[in-house]
Image: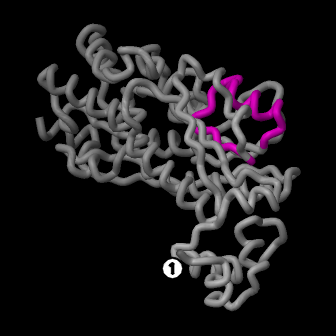
C-alpha cells in the first residue's frame, strides 16, 4: 500500500505539503494540489482518516441528506451522488449518505453525526434539515434554493430553474403550443416554487391565459400515488374534463413514461397528438424511448461536484457565502413537434 512518502517523492513535494493538500490546514497552490492528487490516484494512496482527524481536529467526513420514498434512486440521484463522492474523495473526505424517509425528515438529524459539513439535496420551504444544521453551526450547502425564514445568506448550488422553464415554454410556444400542461415537482419543494412562478410569468408574457388544469404537483414521495404521477392527471384533464392539451411538460422521466402510457391508453400518440418534454431524466433512457424524448440536460454529476467544491470553500472560510449556477441545455429529440406538423401527420 502506498505511503505518504511515496506520494511526496513522485510529486516532488514534501510530506508536509501532501498532508496540507488533504487536510487543507494550510493553503497550497492549485498546480501543486492537482499534482499531488494526480499522483495519489495513480498510487491508490488513501490518507489515514483517524490519524489526520487527530491532527486537524476534523472528522474528514461530510454528510449528504436525501429524502426518499419506497423506491430506488433515479439516475439523476445516482449521477449526483457519484459526483459528490468522487469530488469529496479528491479532498480526502468521506461521504455519509443520510437517506431520510420523507415522513421522518425531522429526525434523525445530520447535525447529530460527526461531520465537518453537509450537503442538502431537494430543499423544501422551512426545511427542518437546514434549520437543524444552521442551529448547530454546521457549515452546509444546499442543492436548490433556500426558503427558510430564519436564514439569510446561505450557500447554494443550483440550476437556473426559472430560466429552464422559460426556455421550455419558449421552445414549445414557438412551435405553436398554447394549450400546455405542467406536471411540476412536489408543491413545497423550492424548485417547484421557482418553476411555477416562471411558468405563470412566461404564459403571461406570451398573453396566454393560465387555467386551473395547466399546473399539477407531484404527490408526497411516500404516497402510493407518487409512482403513478402523470397518468391520472393526463387522463383526467384530456378525457374527463375534455380540455385541449397539445403539449405536456413532465418533471422527470418516471412521470413522462406515465404520461406516455396514459396517452396511449386514450388512443392518442406522441408527438402526433401531444408533444412531451422532460425536465429531469436519464438521457440514455430518454434517447432509447419510442419516440425519443426531448428534455433538459441538468448535469447532475456536475451539481454534485460543485456542491462539494463550494462546501470546501466554506470549511476553509466560514464567512464565505455564494450561489453557484450549473448550466443546463435542451436536448432536442422526437417527442416534440410543432402544432402544424402534428396536425399534418394525423
**Which residue in the structure is indicated by mark 1?**
42
Task: Return the residue found at the far right.
Answer: 319
Looking at the picture, how far across and down is residue 216, in whole percent?
44, 20
- Name the residue: 21% across, 50% down: 288
- Name the residue: 52% across, 24% down: 101
- Name the residue: 85% across, 57% down: 317
For the residue pair 226 and 159, the one nearer the viewer reads as 226
Residue 127 in magenta?
yes
Query: Picture quarter containing residue 122?
Result: top right
Q: Which residues are magenta?
A: 116-138
Q: Is residue 255 left or right of residue 165?
A: left
Query: Picture quarter containing residue 316?
Result: bottom right
The secondary element bearing badge 1 is classed as: helix
Q: Is residue 110 left or right of residue 263?
A: right
Q: Is residue 233 left or right of residue 201?
A: left
For the residue pair 122 and 84, the one nearer the viewer reads as 84
Looking at the picture, how far across and down is residue 61, in whole percent?
67, 50
- Name the residue: 82% across, 54% down: 57
Colour pattern of the rendering: one colour
For the residue pair 255 and 204, the one nearer the viewer reads as 255
Looking at the picture, how far across and down is residue 33, in whole percent?
69, 77
The quadrant of the image that shows the C terminus is top left
Res 79 seen here: yes
Pointer 1 local density, CA inside 10 Å: few below 14, some 14–19, many at least 20: few
Q: From what the image shows, is residue 312 above or below residue 67?
A: below
For the residue pair 29 and 144, the one nearer the viewer reads as 29
Amino acid at each position: 500500500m502506498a505511503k505518504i512518502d511515496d506520494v511526496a517523492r513522485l510529486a516532488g513535494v514534501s510530506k508536509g505539503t501532501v498532508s496540507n493538500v488533504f487536510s487543507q490546514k494550510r493553503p497550497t497552490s492549485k498546480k501543486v494540489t492537482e499534482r499531488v492528487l494526480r499522483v495519489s490516484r495513480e498510487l491508490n494512496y488513501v490518507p489515514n482518516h483517524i490519524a489526520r482527524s487527530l491532527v486537524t481536529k476534523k472528522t474528514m467526513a461530510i454528510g449528504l441528506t436525501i429524502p426518499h420514498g419506497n423506491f430506488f434512486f433515479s439516475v439523476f440521484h445516482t449521477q449526483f451522488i457519484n459526483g459528490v463522492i468522487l469530488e469529496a474523495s479528491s479532498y480526502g473526505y468521506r461521504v455519509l449518505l443520510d437517506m431520510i424517509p420523507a415522513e421522518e425528515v425531522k429526525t434523525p438529524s445530520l447535525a447529530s453525526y460527526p461531520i465537518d459539513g453537509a450537503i442538502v439535496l431537494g430543499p423544501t420551504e422551512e426545511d427542518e434539515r437546514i434549520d437543524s444544521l444552521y442551529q448547530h453551526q454546521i457549515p452546509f450547502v444546499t442543492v436548490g434554493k433556500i426558503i427558510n425564514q430564519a436564514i439569510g445568506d446561505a450557500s447554494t448550488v443550483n440550476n437556473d430553474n426559472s430560466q429552464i422553464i422559460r426556455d421550455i415554454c419558449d421552445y414549445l410556444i414557438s412551435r405553436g403550443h398554447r394549450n400546455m400542461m405542467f406536471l411540476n415537482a412536489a408543491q413545497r419543494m423550492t424548485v417547484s416554487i421557482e418553476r411555477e412562478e416562471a411558468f405563470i410569468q412566461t404564459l403571461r408574457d406570451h398573453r396566454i391565459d393560465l387555467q386551473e388544469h395547466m399546473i399539477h404537483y407531484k404527490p408526497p414521495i411516500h404516497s402510493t400515488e407518487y409512482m403513478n404521477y402523470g397518468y391520472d392527471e393526463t387522463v383526467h384533464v384530456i378525457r374527463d374534463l375534455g380540455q385541449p392539451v397539445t403539449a405536456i411538460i413532465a418533471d422527470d422521466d418516471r412521470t413522462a413514461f406515465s404520461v406516455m402510457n396514459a396517452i396511449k391508453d386514450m388512443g392518442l400518440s406522441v408527438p402526433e397528438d401531444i408533444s412531451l418534454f422532460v425536465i429531469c431524466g436519464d438521457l440514455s433512457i430518454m434517447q432509447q424511448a419510442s419516440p425519443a424524448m426531448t428534455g433538459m440536460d441538468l448535469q447532475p454529476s456536475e451539481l454534485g461536484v460543485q456542491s462539494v467544491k463550494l462546501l470546501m470553500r466554506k470549511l476553509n472560510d466560514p464567512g464565505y457565502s455564494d450561489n453557484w449556477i450549473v448550466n443546463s441545455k435542451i436536448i432536442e429529440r422526437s417527442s416534440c413537434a410543432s402544432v402544424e406538423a402534428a396536425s399534418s401527420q394525423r
